[in-house]
Image: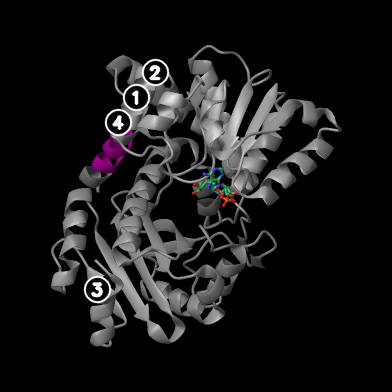
């Protein structure tokens, strides 16, 4: 479906700024494919907003609120190829949020927002305020937060128009409300707990002395490297497509390690990261990187990283299991960011202590997945889905 024959175009023709689509409510024939996906994947509704004067084209998908009335999920701004790509993304990501919250024990439903536009050119204060007003009008059904190309400062701007956003800068104060700041360090700490769970399950001892290959040395990947260095790993192998990130990784960490780090780390080209001999491979860049091909190249015992939607498809999950590689399902191990942002909305205000306690639960949550995987002889990603679905099902029944 191209840009000119889709739902947004129809909204423009009809001067309609807001459109709701549900599995049982299809306002235009162009929206039928959306309702079809929603019926299959169990979504509640999706809202589309089109405000041409500020170039706001956005979709908020509410996947499931069996666990709580309010659904939480980040706001992502990307220059999608077409509206089908944007809406498919928001539907997929909102479902993953339901599962992530369910496993992490976060009392929130799953949702997501995508803004279809060029973040460098189209992200204006006016766009963010219009979006904030639309979120406000949903009266708490959806709570937005930071995600790709939407940062804490953007959330702070939106907060001027709505209280239904989270992930404010650390310095933000308003009554008991205290900004939870950049979630990346918390996510990275959660990955470390997850790695320890993997090692424990395989009886491989501590992180100390291990070799870890990190794909993506961005906000999470870099912090992860720092934490791993503190844990005494033997070597960190890094890769990034952005030379600035590589320079940052090499220079900063080298300084922190007082010269030792140069011996401990190395950087490899983008494609080479998969075939590095290591104990743990940590994908911390884009999604869909575990394919039939890349899995066959892996020379590690464990895959444990932050990237969302790491498996290209279920075949990759089966292949990992066949190769004897323990895969820590992405949404179980990378829940730290969600835990952090959710805590900002606690009635007593954000607490590092509470976040830390919840973060530590990533370890037992993964152990449970691994145990069932072994017991039932099923890939870990399938087991994680089953455990999440069980929680959602029970919440639905007991509501
Ligand atoms: P980021 O944009 O800061 O870092 C991603 C890095 O990956 C960038 O440096 C980019 O240049 C690099 N990259 C992209 N493609 C690559 C490739 N093919 N090979 C090597 N490097 C590549 O993002 P981030 O906040 O660090 O998040 C990393 C991943 O973790 C994303 O998938 C994100 O959705 C997920 N995640 C992040 C958080 C969080 O708290 N930030 C929470 C949960 C999940």
Q: Position of residue 19 (x, y in %)?
A: 26, 75
- Which comes sooner in the sequence, label 2 or label 3? 3
Within 10 Å of disc 3 (Cα), the crowding (few <14, some 14-19, many 20+) is many
Q: Is residue 387 magenta?
A: yes
**Do the residues under discs 2 and 1 have CB atoms within 8 angstroms?**
yes
In this view, the mark in front (3 or 1): 1
Residue 340 visible in the displayed image: yes
Q: Which mark is residue 364?
A: none
Q: Residue at x 50, y 52 (%)?
A: 342
Q: Quadrant of residue 88?
A: bottom left
Q: Quadrant of residue 249?
A: top right
Q: Residue at x 69, y 44 (%)?
A: 246
Q: Residue at x 30, y 54 (%)?
A: 65
- Could you say whether the residue bearing mark 3 is in a helix, strand or loop? helix
Q: Which residues are magenta?
A: 386-394
What residue is shown with label 1? Answer: 319
- Could you say whether the residue bearing mark 4 is in a helix, strand or loop? helix
Marks 4 and 2, how far apart at CA? 12 Å
Q: For disc 2, does the CB lie below 8 Å from ligand 1? A: no
Q: Position of residue 369 (x, y in %)?
A: 38, 26
What residue is shown with label 3? Answer: 7
**Do the residues under discs 3 and 4 have CB atoms within 8 angstroms?**
no
Marks 3 and 4, how far apart at CA? 33 Å
Q: Which mark is residue 323?
A: 2
Q: How many marks?
A: 4
- Could you say whether the residue bearing mark 2 is in a helix, strand or loop? loop
Residue 356 visible in the displayed image: no
């Amino acid at each position: 479906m191209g840009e000119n024959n889709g739902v947004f175009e129809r909204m423009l023709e009809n001067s309609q700024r807001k459109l709701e689509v549900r599995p049982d409510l299809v306002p235009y024939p162009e929206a039928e494919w959306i309702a079809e996906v929603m019926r299959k994947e169990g979504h509640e509704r999706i809202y589309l907003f089109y405000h041409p004067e500020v170039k706001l084209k956005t979709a908020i998908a509410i996947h499931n609120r069996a666990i709580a009335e309010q659904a939480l999920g980040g706001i992502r701004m990307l220059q999608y190829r077409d509206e089908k790509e944007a809406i498919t993304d928001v539907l997929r990501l909102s479902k993953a949020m339901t599962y992530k919250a369910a496993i992490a024990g976060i009392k929130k439903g799953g949702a997501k927002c995508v803004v279809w536009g060029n973040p460098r050119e189209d992200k204006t204060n006016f766009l963010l305020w219009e979006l904030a007003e639309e979120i406000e009008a949903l009266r708490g059904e959806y709570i937005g937060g930071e995600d790709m190309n939407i940062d804490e400062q953007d959330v702070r701007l939106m907060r001027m128009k709505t209280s239904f956003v989270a992930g404010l800068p650390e310095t933000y104060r308003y009554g008991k409300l205290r900004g939870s700041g950049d979630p990346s360090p918390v996510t990275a700490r959660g990955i470390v707990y997850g790695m320890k769970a993997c090692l424990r399950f395989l009886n491989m001892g501590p992180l100390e002395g291990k070799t870890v290959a990190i794909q993506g040395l961005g906000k999470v990947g870099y912090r992860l490297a720092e934490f791993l260095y503190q844990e005494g790993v033997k070597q960190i192998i890094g890769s990034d497509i952005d030379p600035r990130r590589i320079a940052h990784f090499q220079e900063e960490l080298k300084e922190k390690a007082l010269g030792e780090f140069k011996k401990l780390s190395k950087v490899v080209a983008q494609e080479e990261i998969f075939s590095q001999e290591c104990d743990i491979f940590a994908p911390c860049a884009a999604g869909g990187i575990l394919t039939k091909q890349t899995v066959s190249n892996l020379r590690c015992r464990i895959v444990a990283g932050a990237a969302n939607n790491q498996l290209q498809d279920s075949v990759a999950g089966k292949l990992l299991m066949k190769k004897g590689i323990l895969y820590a399902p992405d949404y179980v191990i990378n829940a730290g960011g969600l835990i952090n942002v959710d805590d900002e909305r606690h009635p007593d205000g954000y607490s590092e202590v509470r976040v830390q306690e919840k973060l530590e639960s990533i370890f037992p949550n993964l152990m449970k997945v691994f145990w069932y995987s072994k017991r039932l002889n099923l890939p870990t990603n399938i087991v994680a889905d089953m455990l999440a679905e069980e929680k959602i099902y029970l919440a639905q029944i007991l509501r």
